[in-house]
Amino acid sequence: MESKILGIHHITAMAGDAQRNVDFYIKILGLRFVKKSINQDAPDVYHLYYGDETGSPGTAITFFPFGRAARGVRGSGEISRVAFAVPSVSQDFWISHLSKNGIHFDGPIEIFNNEVISFQDPDGMTIELVFSDKQELRFPWKKSNVPTEYAIKRFFGVSMCLNKSDASVSVLQGLLGARPLAQEGNRQRYLIGIGSDEAAVDIIVDPTMPRARQSAGSVHHIAWRVNDFQEHEQWRHVVEESGLQTTEIIDRFYFHSIYFREPGGILYEIATDNPGFTVDESLDTLGTQLKLPPWYELQRSKIEQTLPPIKMPEYSGER
């Protein structure tokens, strides 16, 4: 098959309070709020999207906020850490910025020759900032209160916790085309994607680790990126022929998706670049209104009454 996975498309996690989630990812991480929509499988729950100026593939982190949901329990069979790439010159800024905002962090420590600091979001999801100059920031969000020269560029990668890795590695390498890079102790690193969109996938193996229980603070799934609808159809057949059970192609309005579980239990998605987040909002107005897929518009009044209000924090533009 000629088509290749380009990198990470997006990562979707579960959260508790929607307002707290918005405040953190806009004010602390400096991301743009690019889309306020709904969980299409549970329309009484928001689907909130953050990223660069356009929410371009490889920058978008999204959340299902379930109100008073309890925190998830970390364990095997989940993505345990989400890593963003930031410029190598930004270390002092981020240490100061997190400290001023009362965010406890660990590090910097070195992992595979990159300096890394880690901290938790309000629901306990572990975030890493990896100081790396390999990735590019193509569409900076100029109204962020994080200066462009220090801003999050895109995903650096993820860490997965597994009891055993052989079958999961077989899917990563044999099906998705990931390439082994190195190993340190029980951590194996693989690279997936092309050019500056290439992402690191760290597999941490611990046979004694209990199974994870997903809830607020848990990564729900990771989406791998392909160019267009034609390649997407090819990938659905490839996944199906590999023996993994996959969904049909699902129209998510902003992209098309298929879903399947890899052998360790982690939910994978393959998503298209097109049509993107400007299909129903202009670039200037992204994230300013509740946007529904056309097939939910008849339910708008009911949906709006169910969802809690969200107040957008002011972009301070501090430099």
Image (cartoon, grey):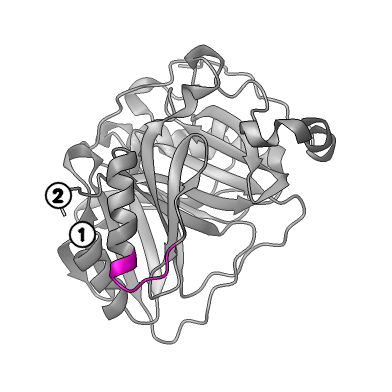
Q: Is residue 302 above or below residue 289?
A: below
For marks 2 and 1 on the same chain, the one whose residue lies earlier in the sequence: 2
Q: Residue at x 27, y 54 (%)?
A: 200
Q: Is residue 209 among what the camera can see? A: yes
Check residue 16 for magenta coloring: no
Q: Is residue 231 above or below residue 241?
A: above
Instruction: Classify residue 298 as left or right of residue 126.
Output: right
Circle 2 sits on which residue?
2
- Whole-number angstrom distance, CA of label 2 to CA of label 1: 15 Å
Residue 305 occupies quadrant: top right
Q: Residue at x 24, y 69 (%)?
A: 188
**Segment tinted magenta in the rendering:** 240-246
Mark 1: which amino acid? Answer: Ala
| Observer-nearest of 77 and 38 | 38
Residue 241 occupies quadrant: bottom left
Circle 1 sits on which residue?
178
Residues packed near mark 1 inside 10 Å, few (<14), some (14 to 19) or many (20 plus)? many
Q: Is residue 181 above or below residue 83?
A: below
Q: Residue at x 22, y 61 (%)?
A: 190
